[in-house]
Amino acid sequence: MADSQLLILDKKQIQQKINRMAYQILEDNLNEKEIVLAGIWDRGYKLALRLKTVLQEISDLTVTMLRIDLEKENSCLKATTDVEPAKVKNKVIILVDDVLNSGKTLAYGFGVFLNTPHKKIRTVVLVDRSHKIYPVATDFVGLQMATVLKEHVDVVLDVAGQEDGVYLS
């Protein structure tokens, strides 16, 4: 990593946050048999996979994975999924992303499920920067931190040759 980056969370701390969020998800869904982890590609999906691993270790929940690919630079919702949203209807949806900045990505992620009935939708982010422009709330957060707009939060998960970490630059 560049010298101008400050390590905010190391690999061990990230895993501790994931473990805590998995327990919170479990507590929020004690009466459920199945949940859907909808990870926004790519770091949100990687985070969702890690949550799934912990949830399977601590519970009997069936965890279905759904990958959401968004065109984030587009001014309107353009998204694709690896599982048809209709196949996860009437289930609990947990929308997962790495960093919440303006809220646009999560808002677009919600859009995937607008025409599908569901029990409830919850949100999970590893880092909430508190710069919301869109009316998006986070249900489960690893770390909430105040940053200035010109700062950048970079989450490194499963990148060859790099240690997992959350960096501020």
Image (tube, rainbow, N blue to C red):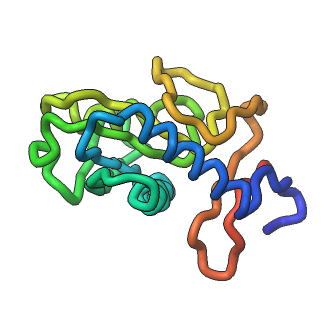
Quarter of the image with the N terminus is bottom right
Report the residue that reaches farthest toward the left: 86
Any part of residue 42 in sight: no
Judge left or right: residue 7 versus residue 65.
Answer: right
Task: Provide residue 147's location: percent of width, then percent of height.
Answer: 77, 33
Of residues 164 and 13, the one drawn nearer to the viewer in this rendering: 13
Task: Provide residue 72's location: percent of width, then percent of height.
Answer: 42, 44
Any part of residue 47 in sight: yes
Q: Residue at x 44, y 39 (%)?
A: 25
Report the residue that reaches farthest toward the top: 135
Judge left or right: residue 46 versus residue 113.
Answer: right
Above or below residue 90? Residue 14 is below
Q: Residue at x 29, y 38 (%)?
A: 93
Q: Residue at x 22, y 35 (%)?
A: 113
Above or below residue 103? Residue 22 is below
Of residues 27 and 154, the one drawn nearer to the viewer in this rendering: 27
Task: Provide residue 29's location: percent of width, then percent of height.
Answer: 35, 35
